[in-house]
Amino acid sequence: MNEHTLTIDADTIDDIGDPAPVPNVPAWKLAFLIVALTGMIVAAFFVGWLPKTHRQQTLVETVQRQKEMLPIVEIVLPKPALETVEVTFPGEIEALEETVIYARTSGYLKRWHVDIGDTVQQGQLLAEIDTPEVDQQLQQALANVEQLKARREVAETKLGLTRYTLTRLDELLQSQAASRQEYDESQAEFAVAEHQVKVADADIAAGMAELQRIKELQSFAKVYAPFAGTITERSIDLGQLVTAGSGQAQSLFRLVSTDRVRGVVHVPQIYAFNIEPGEQAQLLVREMADRTFVGQVARTARSLDLQTRTMRIEIEFDNSDGQLLPGAYVQVRLPLRRPNPPMLIPASALIFNASGSQIATVNAENLVELRAVDVDADYGNVLGIATGIESTDRIVVNPGERLVDGMSVTIAEPDAAG
């Protein structure tokens, strides 16, 4: 590798020349520059600081004014509720008369004459039952009665014989042709014969009663409608065994009377005291929205159910056209009269805290007064107040938690409660 050496001689250095002299800034220029920079910094400080200070001062003054300003509240005047209101309750339709028909005698179903949906009249034949066992019992009862009658004839004949014997012995006793013992024995036999006739009469009466019972059982082989109505259920077929009774026995039909029906409603305690029999009611059926059925309150339970605190109300409706179906869900509208209707206020006016239910009122000096009230009913955005306020009281609409008893307020705009 070749090595190169840079060599500068003295003549070359002389050709470059001397270094440039250091600039000489006048002192007045330097002072002006410092003053200008200082002014700019001070101006920037005041431009940012003064508006901020002004805003803070304005905020402090606003807060102070708000502290010194009286709260502004909106008030309403309570309005008494109507003395008569219409309240709608859910209910259901029940038949005025309904029964499950059972057989009164045992046997086999021989024939049925009606089916589900058939309209029947009172006393109409519904079914016939074949009763071979009852028929046999009837023949036996007839034979037993004949046997008892024959026994009575025997007892009657024996009674006549003992009577004749007693009469003969009485004549012989007077002529001393018979002993006293024979006469006494004959008299005893006569008394026994009399009692045997009475026993025979009693046996015949018992036999006749049994015969009549069996005849009644046999008459139950034909089942008749106890009242006019509609067959809603047939639960037996031809040839099926029928057992008398209503415990575990198979029912035959279910019969309901639909000419008049009743709407059953369970009314809450708050309304129960104001419903009396004879009042008019309306029945609404969702499937027949264009029609309203009118009826009357027929009866009330006059007591509240301990579980639901409701009272059963029954309203009867005419159903001669058969439009109302028993078991249907309906709505019943009742007009209710209240002797002491509550005062209505907005629901937002209620204060509920540890002291109970309260409202804030404003007196003539614009001072807040907190009052304890009793809520009668809740209608959603309106409350019914039973006690605690008058119609002239000014009620604060939205008191919140900021109002305390005795606080001075400013009324925004009085209004009447809707």
Image (cartoon, rainbow, N blue to C red):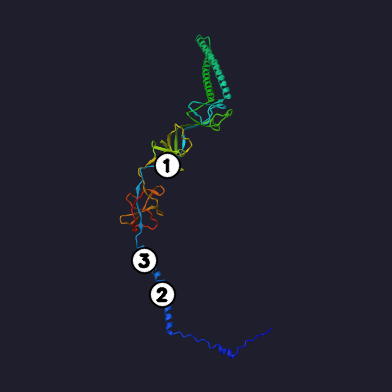
Disc 2 versus disc 1: distance between alpha carbons?
78 Å
The numbered mark, 3 or 1, whose residue comes first in the sequence reads 3
Residue of label 3: 61
**Closest to the observer: 407 or 105?**
407
> Where residue 88 is drawn, which disc sits there?
1
Q: Is residue 149 above or below residue 91?
A: above
Spot the residue most to the right.
1
> Where residue 43 is drawn, which disc sits there?
2
Let me know if residue 357 appears in the view: no
- x, y percentage for residue 305? 45, 41
Residue 131: quadrant of the picture? top right
- x, y percentage for residue 372? 37, 52
Q: Amino acid at mark 1?
A: Thr
Callout 3 secondary element: helix
Label 1 CA crowd tier, 10 Å (few <14, some 14–19, many 20+): some
Disc number lying in front (3 or 1): 3
Residue 88: quadrant of the picture? top left
- x, y percentage for residue 270? 40, 44
The numbered mark, 3 or 2, whose residue comes first in the sequence reads 2
Q: Is residue 269 above or below residue 175?
A: below
Q: Is residue 142 above or below residue 104?
A: above
The numbered mark, 2 or 1, whose residue comes first in the sequence reads 2
**Closest to the observer: 9 or 210?**
9
Residue 206 lies left or right of residue 409; in this view the side is right
Q: Amino acid at mark 3?
A: Glu
Callout 1 secondary element: strand
Check whether the beta carbons of the residues at disc 3 and disc 1 lie within 8 A of each other: no
